[in-house]
Image: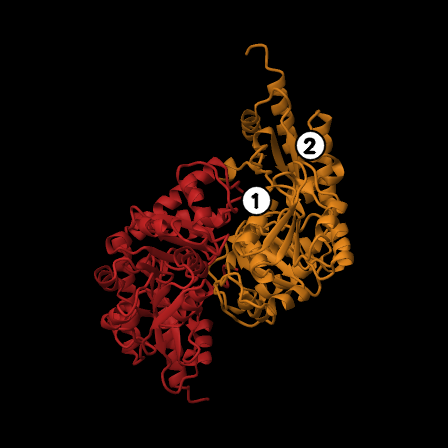
Chain colours: A orange, B red
Amino acid sequence: MPGSHKLCMIPGPVEFDEAVLAAMAAPATSHVSPNFIETFGSTIELCRKVFLAPNGQPFIIAGSGTLTWDITAANLVEPGENVLVVNTGVFGDWFGECLGVYGANVTHVRAPFGARPSLEEIEKALTAKKYKLITVTHVDTSTSVFVDIKSIAKMVKEKSPDTLIALDGVCSVGAEEIRQEEWGLDVVMTASQKALGTPPGLAIMVVSQRALEVAANRKAEPRTYFGSFKKWLPIMKQYEARKPSYFATPSVQLILALHTSLKQLVDQGMETRFAKHREASKKVKDALEKWGLKLVPHSRDIAANTLSAVYYPDGIKGPELLQKIGAAGVVVAGGLHPEHAAKYFRIGHMNVSAVNEAENGHLDKTLHAIESALKVKRHPSPSL
Amino acid sequence: MPGSHKLCMIPGPVEFDEAVLAAMAAPATSHVSPNFIETFGSTIELCRKVFLAPNGQPFIIAGSGTLTWDITAANLVEPGENVLVVNTGVFGDWFGECLGVYGANVTHVRAPFGARPSLEEIEKALTAKKYKLITVTHVDTSTSVFVDIKSIAKMVKEKSPDTLIALDGVCSVGAEEIRQEEWGLDVVMTASQKALGTPPGLAIMVVSQRALEVAANRKAEPRTYFGSFKKWLPIMKQYEARKPSYFATPSVQLILALHTSLKQLVDQGMETRFAKHREASKKVKDALEKWGLKLVPHSRDIAANTLSAVYYPDGIKGPELLQKIGAAGVVVAGGLHPEHAAKYFRIGHMNVSAVNEAENGHLDKTLHAIESALKVKRHPSPSL
C-alpha cells in the first residue's frame, strides 16, 4: 500500500501528517475512559483556537461536512423563515436545497460560473426582506471561488443586525483567514478531511452564543434528533468539563486524530497557517498561469488559497491529462459542476502539502507532474 | 500507548483486529479513486452477506448508530403515522423519542427492567390499531435484554403484513443470529464499533426493497437532507457498480477498515460467528453466576450473547470494583439506565474477544480480573 501511494492533491481528502494517521490506528478505547475524555475535552478547546472564537461553542459530531448544513438548517431556521444564500457554485445550490428541506424560504444571490456576487448585490438582496439567516460558502470547492466573508459580515451587521451569519468553511477552515468572533460569524462549519488535516468522518462546527440562544428559544422543536443542538450541547459541555457523557458514540479514533492535527495547527499558529496557504496557492497559480492555463475564478483576488480550479488547455482531453498526472504519482480532481465539469480540473493544496512544502515537496512534485503531462500531450514524440 | 492499553471489554467500542486498525491508518485516498471505489463497492456487497439479505440495499454513511434511527424515522414514517416500539431499555425510549421528532405517533410496549414484553403483549398492542412501522431493539445495550425478533417478525407478517419491521441491531449485527431476508426484516440498523469490529464512525443499515418502495412513494418529502434515502440510494448503487459518485464525502479510512473486518466475518462464516458469540456469552455468564452474581435479564433465554449485564454483589461499591478491574488491565462499563445505573455493570464480549478467545484469551483475562477484584473486596486482607 505505501509503495503504491499516490500523492492525494485533490481538494479533500488531503494528505495527512503521519502522527495523525498513527492516531487513527489507536487501539480500542472506551468513549468514557479518562484518557479519551481528556483528549475529547482538549479537542473541543482547540477548535476555539483554530476558529478564533474564544467564546464559541464547538460541536464535533460523527458525520461529514454536509451534516453541518442539516444541523444549521434544523436548529437555526424555523419553517417559513427566510434564508439568503450567497451562491458561488454547486455547494451553494445544495446548501440551499438542504435549507429548503427544513422549511426555509430560500433566496439565492448568484453569479456566473467563476464569479461571485458583489457586496452591493448581496446588500440589495439582504435588504429586500427580513432574513433569519445568511449563508456564505467561503470557498466553493466546485469553482474555487473565494468569498470575502469579512466584508459581507460587516455589511450584514450594519444593514440587518439580527440576521444570523453562517459560513460554510468546509474548504477553508484551517487555511483561509477566518476570525469567527472578531468578524461576528454565528456559525462556521467544516469537515475533518480538508485543512484540518484529519481523515474524513467528522462534522465540525463552532456556534456563537447568540445563535445558541436563537436555537434555545425556537417556537417549534428542531426537525432532527441526531443533529439537535439540545442533544449535543450538554455532551460537548460535559466532555469539556472532563466528565463522561453519552448521546451517541463519538468516533474515538477520528477524534484522537483530530486532536493530533489541531495541536499541530495551533503550534504552527493560525497566522502562519494562513500565510503558508497563501504562499502555496500563489506558487501553484503562478506556475499554471505561466504555462498559459486559465483559472476558473475570473480574477486572482476571488480565487481560493486552498485549491486551484483551472481550465484544460485547448486540444487537451481532460481524462487523458488526469490519467497522465496520475501515472506520475499525483492524484488531482476533475471538475465538479454539472454544466462545466468536463472543462476544468482542480488541484488541492492544503494542510501538510501547503504548510510543509519545504520538507515534503508536494507542490513541486504536483507541478512537475502536471507540467510533464501537459508537455506530452502538446508535443507528441515523433515516433507516435 | 500500546504498553498502556487496557483491554476494552465494554459493549462497544470493542477490541479490533490489528489488520482493521492498520487500515485505519491508510494514507490519504481520494473518495473517487479506482481503488477506493472498488473497496467501497465490495464493502456494500459484503454487508448483504453479513446481514443475510441478498436482495437488501445497504447504506454505509458517516455517523453513529443513532443516525440510523433518524434515517429510518425520516424516510419510512410520515407525520401522524403510528409506530410501535418494542421497548426493553433506554435505547427503546430514545428511538421512540427520535421517531416522535419526525412526527410519528409512538406507542411503547414496555416491560419491567430486565424483562421483555411477551409475544402476546406485542401482538395485542400491534392489533389495537394500524401501525406503519414496528421497531425492535434486538439487544438493548442498557439492559442486555435480547428480543426474539424472529418470532415477532413472524407474528407481524401474520397479523399486520403491511407493517414495516425495523430492527435496531446496533449491539447484535455480526454476532447474534439475524437472517434479515428470511425473517422479512425491512430495516436492520447497526454501527461500526460493535460486532462488526470497526472503530466508531459509521452508520450502517440494510433496507428491504419493500421499504425502499414505501420511501419512494411518500406523500411528503422526508424531513432530512443528510439522511435521505433519495440522496444516498444512487450513491450506493454507483459505488456498487464501481463508478465514482458524490453526495457527501465518505469516511475513506473507516470504510477501508470496515471492508477489512467484513471480509474477516464472511471468511469466518456467519454461522460460526453466531456460535462463537453464544459460546463466549455462556462462558462469561457461567462464571459470573458461579461466583454468585445475578444477571440483569430475568432469565438466560432473554439475555444477549453480545454482552453481560450483572448486578454488583451486596456490600460491594460499584465504582471501586470497576476501578479494581481497570487496575488489572481490563475496562468494563458501568450501568446505563437512569433508574438502575448504580446497581449493575456491563461486560462486552464481541468480535475478536468472542471469536478468537483461543488465541487472545480476552475472556479469560477479563474473568480473571473480575474474579480478583471481587475477592479483594469481599475478603479484605487482615492488615487492613
Q: Say if B73 sits above or below B89 in the image.
A: above
Residue A171 position in % (x across, y down): 63, 46
Mark 2 neighbour class, 10 Å CA radius: few under 14, some 14 to 19, many 20 or more: many
Tell me where residue B236 sits by quadrant. Answer: top left
- Three-letter amino acid code of the residue under disc 1: Pro
Q: Nearer the viewer, mark 1 or mark 2?
A: 2
- Please say whether residue B27 is visible from this viewpoint: yes
Nearest the eye: B114 or A28:
B114
Q: State the residue at coordinates (61%, 39%).
A: A142
Label 1 element class: loop
Residue A80 position in % (x across, y down): 58, 58
Residue B3 position in % (x across, y down): 50, 61
Q: Are marks 1 and 2 on the same chain?
A: yes
Q: Say if A220 sits above or below A159 in the image.
A: below
Q: Which residue is mark 2?
A: A295
Nearest the eye: B137 or B340:
B137
Q: Which residue is mark 1?
A: A13
